[in-house]
Amino acid sequence: MTTFAQVIGSAAALFCLYRFLIRTIGVERLGIWSLVLAATSVVTLANQGFSTSIVKFVAKYVAREQTESVSVLIQTAVISIALALGLLSIGLYPGAKWLLTIVLPPSRLAEAIALLPYAFVSLWINLVGSILQAGLAGYELIAHRNYVVLGGSTLYLLLSFVLVPHHGLLGLAYSQTIQAGACFLASWILLRRCVPGLPFVPQRWDSALFREMAGYGLHFQLITISQSVREPVTKALLARFGGLELTGYYDMALRWVVTFREFIVQANQVLVPTISSLQERDPLSIPLVYRESYRVVFFLAIPTFALLTVASPLVSLIWMGREEPVFVHFVALLAAGWVVNILSNPAYVVDLGTGALRWVSIGCGITAALNAVLGLLAGKYISGTAVVAAYVISLILGYAVVIAAYHIENRVPLTELLPKESFGILFSSLAGAAIFLPLATTWSGHSWFSLHVAFGFCAAAVAIIVVPMWLHPMRKRLMNWALSRLPA
């Protein structure tokens, strides 16, 4: 329940933030901020999957009741990541500055370069803080982590309201840096209450535990690299072939789609420590966990992504005061790619819990390579919008490999990718998106088109999609589960 509240709350904060930023600084300057963040995100290469390693190994040592190892494990990870990220940030600063000089017009360059130090610092704090949040997840204290994330989103929104009108984009950078520091401190305080012997300042570094985490992270390194370079490459190609405004619309569409992805993925991600514990106690039950997890994800993902696609004209009207076709098209494209990513998440989670990351690495590597090659060709010979289409194709093909490989290696029939009881949900979701998105896009040019009409289209799509969801047996199971988590 707290995961649901955290995602909904973060989505609401994001919604309000983008509406505020568009009216305060404009879409083009929002594109500058997006490019700066993309240029600094390469720093995540130094993570090497330590956050995921922490979830797995904390759960492992908690299951073995080795609390001292948990304390040393967390300290080792924090010290290692803090040093590696700090050195890498210093080394990459000139490269990030050079990249901005290539993709940005001279009139915008000074503003972007002024943002770079804050972007690096906030990213450093966030990545080190992710180790602490992973430690909470490893203890299966998901609620504590969700409170920190939701509080951070709210703080970021409030600080932006105060600082952006006076300082512009620098105010946004100040807000993100302060928010990162607050989340770090909150996570550390909560973790110290859970882990006996964890000092206020990390002091112990254990080479054996570091090698254990690093060994697990070798396959995860390719995953980290692909995820780190995917967005900078896409945004750089968009800025080069489509301009800053197109980059801003893409960033808005991506955040809209990924926010709903997080709702499903974060709820499913809590299974990583569970699977890690099962591997120690009852490995034969893991395939059953995968099947049930996939059915839940399918039940939630297909209608959710159909609805967020249909709602994109309404979101555009609220955010920008008009129905922006580019934003709507980007949402539809990104939804098609990210829904495949979500359907691969149950296999991904099982592989994380068991440490079998070879095919996840291969799938993510395919995604990164195709994104760069197809994006460059699409931007050069077609248009900037085609860069986003190439990005989506790379997502679909790469994560389809992850799904197929899991089913083949574990002898799970491929027919289970489309659960029989979910035929109605798939049909109604596709029908709702196919009928009402074209109607909303076509009629938005009429002078009488308004929020009321856009809301009417969304309500009609909801009616079509929700009926088979209500009749689905999974609905009753999830409602019973949710009610069991409420106070008596």
Image: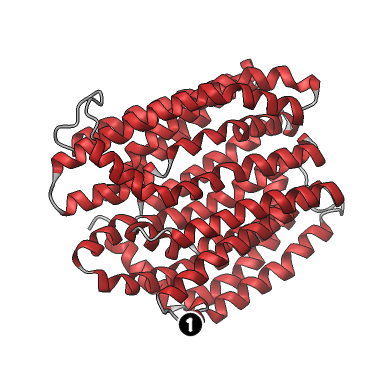
Q: Position of residue 9 (x, y in %)?
A: 47, 44
User: What residue is shown at x 34% (from left), y 62% (from top)?
Assistant: 482
Q: Position of residue 439 (x, y in %)?
A: 78, 64
The answer to whether 479 is drawn above or below residue 366 in the figure is below
Q: Nearer the viewer, residue 76 or 215?
A: 215
**Mark 1: which amino acid?**
Glu
Quadrant position of residue 126: top left
Q: Is residue 83 left or right of residue 283?
A: right
User: What residue is shown at x 43% (from left), y 42% (from top)?
Assistant: 48
Quadrant position of residue 348: bottom left
The residue pinned by badge 1 equals 421
Mark yes or no: residue 139 visible: no
The answer to whether 279 is drawn above or below residue 159 in the figure is below
User: What residue is shown at x 49% (from left), y 51% (from top)?
Assistant: 262
Q: Position of residue 306 (x, y in %)?
A: 62, 64
Secondary structure under tag 1 reads helix
The answer to whether 3 is drawn above or below residue 473 in the figure is above
Q: Nearer the viewer, residue 315 or 391?
A: 391
Q: Position of residue 462 (x, y in %)?
A: 60, 66
Mark yes or no: residue 114 visible: yes
User: What residue is shown at x 45% (from left), y 60% (from top)?
Assistant: 358
Q: Is residue 256 left or right of residue 193?
A: right
Q: Is residue 203 left or right of residue 174?
A: left
Q: Split into 4 quadrants, where in the image is the N terminus?
A: bottom left
Quadrant position of residue 455: bottom right
Other-residue count near label 1 (Cα within 10 Å), few / some / many at <14 / 14–19 / ≥20:
some
